[in-house]
Image (tube, rainbow, N blue to C red):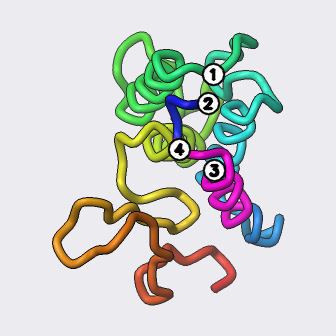
Amino acid sequence: MSDFRPAAEIEADRAACLAYQPSSRTDEAQGAIDAYDWLLGRKTAPLSGGDLPATKPRAVAEAQLADNAARGRPGAPRVRGPEATWTESYVIGVRDALGWATGERRASPGGREDLTGLPGTASGLIIVPEHRRRRTREE
């Protein structure tokens, strides 16, 4: 898993996504959870279904598939209409989780933000203040 953030960080963000009560958990959070489970070796790839172990090239390809689906690009899985396999929110959760885990995105689906290298920051991850967190349906 050296191509990804440390497993402990991924586990912590997964736990943050799981912290939402099941009745209020968004599809986006579930997409992130499924992506993290794949990276941690617990499930198959969330969109392609590939059972190969997660590597950075595979994770980047899976994130690109999710991005293509979210943008409605030709040849990508459908996320709108009666033929939709997943919701748009789900594929965005997959994309964002894989992007964060590979270091391509700063903010994680669970509300963690990587500030490494920014002026005035000492070292890496912080928890995003409550006023900047995404709200769930029940909040």
**Mark 4 secondary-structure assignment:** loop
SS for callout 3: helix
The amino acid pointed to by label 2 is Met
> Foreground: 133 or 28?
133
Separation of marks 3 and 1 at Cα, in angstroms: 13 Å
Q: Which residue is mark 2?
A: 1
Name the mark on residue 10: 3
**Which label sits in the foreground, 1 or 2?**
2
Q: Secondary structure at mark 1?
A: loop
N-terminal-most mark, 4 or 1: 4
Tell me which corner region of the image, top left, top right, bottom left or bottom right, holds residue 20: bottom right
Cα–Cα gap, marks 1 and 2: 8 Å
Mark pair 4, 3: CA separation: 7 Å
Q: Residue 47 occupies which quadrant of the picture?
A: top right
The location of residue 30, given as percent across then percent down, is 69, 50
Q: Which residues are magenta?
A: 5-17
Q: Tell me which residue sits at (50%, 87%) in the image.
A: 130
- In terms of secondary structure, what is the magenta stretch mainly? helix
Tell whether position 10 is magenta: yes
